Amino acid sequence: MKFFVDTAEIDAIAELNELGMVDGVTTNPSLIKKSGRDILEVTKEICDLVAGPVSAEVTAVEADQMIAEGRKLAKIAENIAVKVPLTWDGLKACKVLTDEGTMVNVTLCFSANQALLAAKAGATFISPFIGRLDDIALDGMDLIEDIRVVYDNYGFETQILAASIRSVNHVLDCARIGADVMTAPPNVIKALASHPLTDKGLATFLDDIKAANIKIL
């Protein structure tokens, strides 16, 4: 499973990228706002840093304007994936931009039917939002599983990009089901390395090393 990091913070991306933990980046206007920087400037910097796809979201809601914004974003770098919402206008924009050779990430997906439409429109990525379904007492993993079955049934090449991931359990469940990609904040990706028994075992090792006065250098 590919790891995308969901942030616009350059330092956080760089740290994970150095460890080989970044296969791509997802951003949106809210994340850019948190960074306090110009959207085009910070997107270009991320694209220069990361080899994989960098999702940059349009701000328009009508197809023609989305297409125009998408074309402008696509000029930033070759690894831009234009992010559009899963609306009828978003699907129109997806089709046009895809036909022009631009990667498109269709976001705000909450049903397998929506995912089917996105695949038919040629989306590179479909972004089902797990956490937001969990918030309304639905199981976001059911959606990931449904989309996986539908896509596999018909050989769609659209990649399932599990989004709105909030916990390490979300990551594991997505990997089990077979999501192609997951995108998560840096703190969730780092938390994958944590386990209380690892901490306990390390503390024991350190105590033994100190007691035995073991030194390597």
Image (spheres, rainbow, N blue to C red):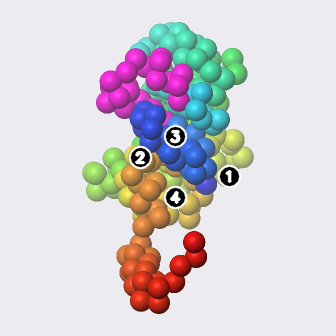
Element at badge 1? helix
Q: Residue shown at 53%/29% (left/top)?
A: 46
Who comes first in sequence, dot 1 or dot 4?
1
Disc 1 versus disc 4: distance between alpha carbons? 19 Å
- Residue under label 3: 14
Q: Residue shown at 41%/54% (left/top)?
A: 188
Disc 4 versus disc 2: distance between alpha carbons? 15 Å
- For the record, the magenta segment spans 26-46
Q: Which mark is residue 185?
A: 2
- Residue under label 1: 153
Q: Quadrant of residue 159?
A: top right
* Rendered-image quadrant of the N terminus: bottom right
Who comes first in sequence, dot 2 or dot 3?
3
Q: How many marks?
A: 4
| Amino acid under disc 2 | Pro
Neighbour tally class for label 4: few under 14, some 14-19, many 20 plus, Cα within 10 Å: many
Disc 3 versus disc 1: distance between alpha carbons? 38 Å
- Is 25 placed left or right of 149 in the picture? left
Element at badge 4? helix
Q: Which mark is residue 85?
A: none
Q: Is residue 40 shown above or below 111?
A: above
Majority secondary structure of magenta residues: helix
| Amino acid under disc 1 | Asn
Q: Is residue 147 shown above or below 63?
A: below
Residue in front for this viewpoint, 182 or 196: 196
- Residue under label 4: 174
Query: Picture coordinates of residue 33 (x, y %)?
Result: 33, 25
| Amino acid under disc 4 | Cys
Q: Nearer the viewer, mark 4 or mark 3?
A: 3
